[in-house]
Structures are given as C-alpha cells and as structure tokens.
C-alpha cells in the first residue's frame, strides 16, 4: 500500500485558512442565519459561477438598530479585502428629495451644474473599493426607506441589470458587486413586540424560533408596504437581524475589549500597557450598556464613556507606565469603574 506521505494527494503542510463563515461569525455575533445566507453568494463569485447581467448578490438587511447589519458588511469587506473600509457606502438619507438624485449620478449635459457635479457613484469609485486580493466591490445603500422615488427607480435598474446610467450617459457596471440594502423598516413594530417581556432574555429558549419568525414577518410586511413587488423580487436574500441577548452582548463586550487592547498596542507601541477587567467590571459595563432600544450601540457608547475615556485620563496623568497594567474593577455599587494602575515592576513581583 502506498504510504500517505508519498501520495500525490498528501495534505499541504499548512492548515487551510478558516472558512468565510467562521471568520464572519467571529466578528458578527448571534446573527448566524444572516451570515449563512450570504456566504454562498461570495463562494459563487469566487468560483466564477455568478450569473452575468446582474449583481453577484443583493441583500436586504432588516431589524432593529445596533444589531450588526453594518457590522456584517464591514466584516465581509475585512474578510475579502483585508480592511473594513473597502465598502462603497451610499447614505440614502441624503437622497430624500427627488432632485437630489443628481448628486448620485451627476446632472445630464446641458443642465445647470453639469460640469460641477461629480457623480457620487461612478465606475472609478466602484473599482476603488476592490483590492489586490479580490475585484469584488461591496456596495452598501444605508437606510433605503429614506430614498426618494427617483432613487428607488435607479436602484431597480441596478438590481435588475447591474447597470446604472449616469447623467453624462456613461455606464456603471455592478456585475462584480455585492449589494447590501439596509433598513430599519419594521423596527418599531419589532420593539413594540419585544417590550412587554423586556427583551429576549426573559424568553424561554424553545419559544425563540417562534418569536424570530414573528419578528421576521413584522419586518417583511413593513417592507412590502413600502416597496413595490418588482423591487422586493429583485432582492436575493432578505435577512431580519434579531435583538441581541445577554450572551451575545457578553461576546460583543469581549470583542470590544480585545479591539481596545489591539488599538493600544498599535498606537502606543513601546509605551503600550495591558488592560484587565474583573467579572464585576464586565457586569457593570453590560448592565449599563444593555438596551433593547439601541442594541450593541449602547454597549459601544458605555465602553467609550466608562472604560476608554477614564483610561485615557489615567494615561495623560502619567499613571499608566509602559508595560504596566490597568486593572479595572467595580465595587458593585458605584456609578463608575475603579482603575488600579500597576507598574511593570509590581507585576513582576506579583508573578
Ligand atoms: N451582532 C453583532 N456582533 C458584533 N458587534 C455588534 C453586533 N451588533 C452590533 N455590534 C456592535 O455595535 C456597533 C453598531 O452596530 P451596527 O453598526 O452593525 O448596527 P446596525 O444594525 O447597522 O444599526 P443601524 O440600523 O442603526 O444602522 C458595531 O460597530 C459593533 O461594534
Ligand atoms: Mg447600520
């Protein structure tokens, strides 16, 4: 029998890179269904099997604020291009009036301002968010419910034929694009639905799937009331993001603290210090940062106000020495966290 090591098919010595779903679900917590629906479209593109004459995928992300819709798009850009910034973002709130669509596509020749208006969306801008790693553009139309009718008509063409005709008659091609549309449509209905029992944590585990379906149908009905069937039919995947439970928020807090540590290391270099939080300190941040209304946004704000800002204060007062450690605790009652700044020598003695 031929030994495995002599085989032409032996495994490469390096472990394969983690798959896209694993990478994304490390960054976007508690929204597995949405991520699972998205990944096959990226694979289809990478395999060269995406259909021609339409965008690679069109995704409508719904659900309450601060639940990870934008985070998903950023995490995908990071996974594909190596930076969360490789996203062409169009804020539809800027196109609420019919005439404002000229800002997006430029005014036609002969119209007043034709020369001055540089279209916000053109082929160069679409190409600028690709990278050496991939030529797939990620485009995000945020808050589409705010867009004027003229903008929706343009979008319809993009979703249908992957083409946008600009004011000067040139064409932008979206065949190598993933298009994300986000909307808070139905979010008010969702929070009304959640309020009686104040969030997901009070729900028994087995009741959750039923509740998830209910929230999905609230969001979908709101979309159907607002957009034409043609529009809805051109969307490949509609995902409703769910309110985050305590467990998800705990993981998000871990992410945010880890992000802070990375930031300290990257920014301060040899002056960097470490940050450790006790369980009680985490409890304080979660207690203050949990909000049915604002999702993980509130947690981010709380981490800024109660962790990052006081740390910056300790640093500017010279209390945090290079290679030292900020031990963060909470006494269970105070309205703020307690910071104990330990020097490198003290740390050495302690260990
Ligand atoms: N599911 C999640 N996983 C990890 N982090 C999250 C998640 N949801 C929210 N966050 C954190 O909260 C911040 C705000 O979330 P995000 O921008 O994705 O909200 P959103 O759903 O797009 O809300 P909005 O509808 O207001 O635009 C993120 O930058 C991230 O730090
Ligand atoms: Mg968002």
Image: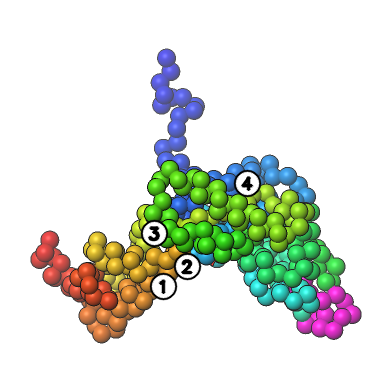
Per the model, the C-alpha gap separating discs 1 and 4 is 34 Å
Q: Circle 3 is placed at which residue position?
A: 249
Per the model, the C-alpha gap separating discs 3 and 4 is 28 Å
Question: Of all residues shown, which one is farthest toward the front?
Answer: 196
User: Which of the two residues, 223 or 271, is positioned nearer the viewer here?
Assistant: 223
Q: For numbered disc 4, what is the local secondary structure?
A: helix
- Residue found 51% across the figure and 62% down from its top: 191
> Residue 257: x and y, percent?
34, 64
**In this image, 133 relative to 170: left or right?**
left
Task: State which tag comes first along the sequence, 1 or 2.
Answer: 2
- Residue found 32% across the figure and 73% down from its top: 307
Is there a contact, CB below 8 Å, between mark 1 and mark 2?
Answer: yes
Per the model, the C-alpha gap separating discs 1 and 3 is 13 Å
Quick check: is the Cβ at mark 3 less than 8 Å away from ligand 1? no
Q: In the image, which disc is placed on residue 294?
A: 2
> Residue 48: x and y, percent?
67, 43
Q: In the image, which disc is placed on residue 200?
A: none
Q: Nearer the viewer, mark 1 or mark 2?
A: 2
Q: Circle 1 is placed at which residue position?
A: 301
Question: Of all residues shown, which one is farthest toward the top?
Answer: 1
**In this image, 90 relative to 68: left or right?**
right
């Amino acid at each position: 029998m031929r030994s495995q090591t002599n085989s032409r098919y032996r495994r490469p010595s390096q472990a394969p890179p983690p798959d896209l779903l694993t990478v994304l679900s490390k960054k976007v917590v508690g929204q597995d269904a949405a991520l699972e629906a998205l990944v096959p479209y990226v694979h289809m593109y990478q395999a060269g099997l995406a259909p021609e004459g339409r965008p690679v995928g069109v995704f409508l992300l719904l659900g309450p604020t601060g639940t990870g819709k934008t985070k998903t798009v950023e995490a995908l850009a990071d996974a594909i291009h190596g930076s969360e910034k490789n996203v062409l973002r169009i804020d539809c709130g800027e196109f609420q009036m019919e005439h404002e669509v000229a800002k997006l596509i430029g005014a036609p020749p002969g119209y007043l301002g034709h020369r001055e208006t540089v279209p916000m969306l053109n082929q160069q801008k679409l190409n600028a968010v690709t990278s050496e790693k991939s030529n797939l553009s990620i485009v995000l139309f945020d808050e589409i419910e705010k867009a004027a009718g003229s903008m929706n008509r343009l979008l319809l063409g993009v979703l249908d034929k992957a083409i946008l005709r600009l004011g000067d008659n040139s064409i932008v091609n979206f065949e190598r694009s993933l298009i994300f549309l986000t909307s808070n449509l139905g979010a008010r209905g969702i929070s009304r639905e959640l309020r009686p029992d104040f969030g997901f944590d009070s729900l028994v585990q087995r009741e959750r799937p039923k509740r998830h379906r209910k929230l999905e149908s609230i969001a979908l009905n709101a979309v159907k009331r607002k957009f034409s069937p043609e529009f809805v039919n051109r969307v490949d995947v509609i995902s409703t993001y769910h309110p985050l439970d305590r467990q998800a928020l705990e993981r998000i807090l871990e992410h945010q603290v880890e992000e802070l540590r990375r930031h300290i290391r990257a920014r301060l270099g040899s002056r960097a210090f470490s940050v450790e939080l006790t369980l009680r300190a985490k409890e304080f941040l979660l207690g203050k940062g949990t909000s049915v209304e604002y999702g993980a946004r509130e947690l981010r704000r709380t981490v800024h106000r109660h962790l990052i800002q006081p740390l910056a204060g300790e640093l500017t007062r010279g209390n945090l020495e290079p290679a030292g450690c900020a031990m963060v605790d909470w006494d269970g009652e105070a309205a703020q966290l307690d910071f104990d700044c330990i020097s490198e020598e003290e740390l050495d003695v302690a260990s």
